[in-house]
Amino acid sequence: MSDTFDVGSRLKKLRLSAGLSQRQLAQYAGVPHGQISMIETNRSSPSVASLRKILGGMGMSMAEFFEPETHEPGQVFFGPEALSDLTSQLGTEASKLTLKQVGNAKDHDLQILREHYAPGADTGETMLTHPANEGGIVLSGEIEVTVGNQTQILRAGDSYLFDSRQPHRFRNISDKPAEVVSACTPPYL
């Protein structure tokens, strides 16, 4: 993906190809009409949660949005350069939180991510929920994980596994970066 990825133009192109007006997409996604307009004209950069919600109104994942070309059918091995970057084009959040996906998650009904959390990175104050199960292992650093009413700081070697319908959040509250490898089925991004 190039450094000049145009989120607004891509959203507009997909919305028009789906035959939706800005108002219709906003209604399907449950967001204000003005938000669609601001993103499409590049006057606003959406958060990960906002973009996921808008794309959900079109039945599209973030991976499909940023990497519309699919991997070769039957591809088994992926070098670091072949991972799909799901967040690097989202403005300021990209410098704090990066999610890179292995292959085509929908083809395998399994999403595998390499997650990088810079100091201060946070998935957001609004807790995430989605119909899936997910788990992961902290490779380096430490990450605060909240699932429902449980919160714990996980360090290198620690892991987690939970039903993603429970509200959850990931934060790096340390002054060092953290790396996590996670899996989710079915895919949610």
Image (spheres, rainbow, N blue to C red):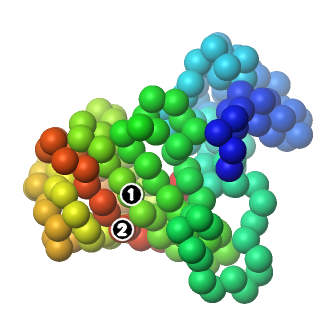
Picture coordinates of residue 120, whole percent (x, y): 24, 37
Marks counted in the figure total 2
Residue 67: mark in rendering? none
Residue 181: mark in rendering? 2
Picture coordinates of residue 92, whole percent (x, y): 45, 29
Picture coordinates of residue 110, whole percent (x, y): 53, 73
* Disc nearer the start of the sequence (2/1): 1
Question: Which residue is tagged 1?
Answer: 115
- Residue at mark 2 to residue at mark 1: CA–CA distance: 6 Å
Give the image quarter of residue 114: bottom left
Give the image quarter of residue 163: bottom left
> With 119 as the anchor, is 89 left or right in this view?
right
Q: Name the quarter where the C terminus is drawn.
A: bottom right
Picture coordinates of residue 135, whole percent (x, y): 32, 70
Mark 2, Cα crowd under 10 Å, few <14 / some 14-19 / many 20+, is: some
Give the image quarter of residue 56: top right
Residue at 63% of width from left, 14% of height from top? 43
Whether tag 2 and tag 1 are in contact, CB under 8 A, the answer is yes
Question: Element under label 1?
Answer: strand
Three-letter residue code for mark 1:
Glu
**Above or below 34: residue 127:** below
Three-letter residue code for mark 2:
Val
Residue at 75% of width from left, 55% of height from top? 68
Residue at 26% of width from left, 68% of height from top? 139
Front residue (pair 144, 15): 144
Front residue (pair 127, 98): 98
Residue at 53% of width from left, 43% of height from top? 88
**Above or below 158: residue 85:** above
Mark 1, Cα crowd under 10 Å, few <14 / some 14-19 / many 20+, is: some
Question: Element under label 2?
Answer: strand
For the question of whether residue 147 can be seen, the reply is: no
For the question of whether residue 6 can be seen, the reply is: yes
